[in-house]
Image: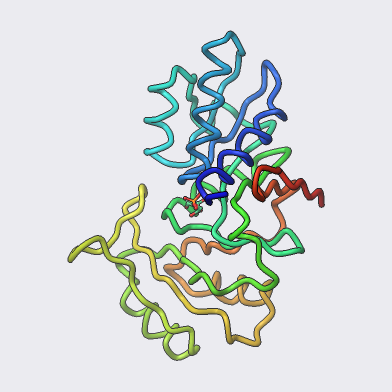
Amino acid sequence: MSAVNEKKVAALEAVKYIKSGMTVGLGTGSTAFFMIEAIGEMVQKGLKLTAVATSDETEKLAKKLGIQVITLAEAKRLDVTIDGADEVDEDFQLIKGGGGALLREKIVAHNSDMNIIIADSSKSVAKLGKFKLPIETIPFATQLIIKELEGMKLAPVQRMRGTDDYKTDENNDIIDIDIWDTDIKLTDLEQLLKTIPGIVETGLFLTTTDLVIIGKGEEAVIKKR
Ligand SMILES: O=C(CO)[C@H](O)[C@H](O)COP(=O)(O)O
């Protein structure tokens, strides 16, 4: 079965956790797309919910499908957030940010009572780091941060869109780094990166995930923390 179908299988399983009256965090990316589409259908059939979007793209899609989108401040707290991931390991640790929405995604995850990650089977890994870890930086500091990360042997590469710097919804930059060979523990690496002024957020989501739903063939494999 194709990755696209596995994404859909995982998404359709995840929306079963949504109940009427909930405030739901909507993730970003091609897997989250199927979840948002399914929630749109549920809303059209009469389900009442409010949603907080993790990116401008998600907000646009949700509104188009008739989902009521509110701000995080209005929501105060979310019942459940469903989002994709670039990699997920056996300890519920993730790399996210391939789609560049890591900052809002991490804020929304932090403010959710339950976080469900949906992914196709290729995202399930024994060890994080084949996927380059995205970090979001303030443009004022980006070039100096790149130099610092080079010194840490993390092979930083600034993300581009064509010939322009890639920009996040917050108008920040993304630097993708290679953590595969680092012997620094992930929790320490996360802390270390956050001590560098100008790094706003990293794509390491180490503690927020409660449930992982992997589409494997026609089946949804559910893993609970
Ligand atoms: O973190 C993300 C966006 O910032 C996405 O969840 C991640 O990139 C996975 O995307 P996709 O479902 O398209 O593979």
Q: Which residue is drawn at 44% across and 83% down?
A: 149
Q: In which quarter of the image is residue 183?
A: bottom right
Q: x, y (%) of residue 48? A: 61, 13
Q: Which one is in front, 113 or 95?
A: 95
The mark total stands at: 0
Q: x, y (%) of residue 169? A: 36, 47
Q: Which one is in front, 113 or 159?
A: 159
Q: Residue at x 70, y 28 (%)?
A: 16
Q: x, y (%) of residue 120? A: 59, 51
Is 101 above or below relative to 144? above
Q: Which residue is drawn at 58% across and 18% down?
A: 42
Left or right of 173? Residue 190 is right
Protein image colouring: rainbow
Query: Residue lying farthest right?
Result: 225
Q: Residue at x 48, y 24 (%)?
A: 69
Q: In which quarter of the image is residue 193?
A: bottom right
Left or right of 153? Residue 88 is right
Is 27 above or below relative to 69? below
Query: Residue lying farthest left?
Result: 163
Query: Residue lying farthest front?
Result: 1
Is 26 above or below relative to 184? above
Query: Residue lying farthest top?
Result: 46
Q: x, y (%) of residue 209? A: 71, 51
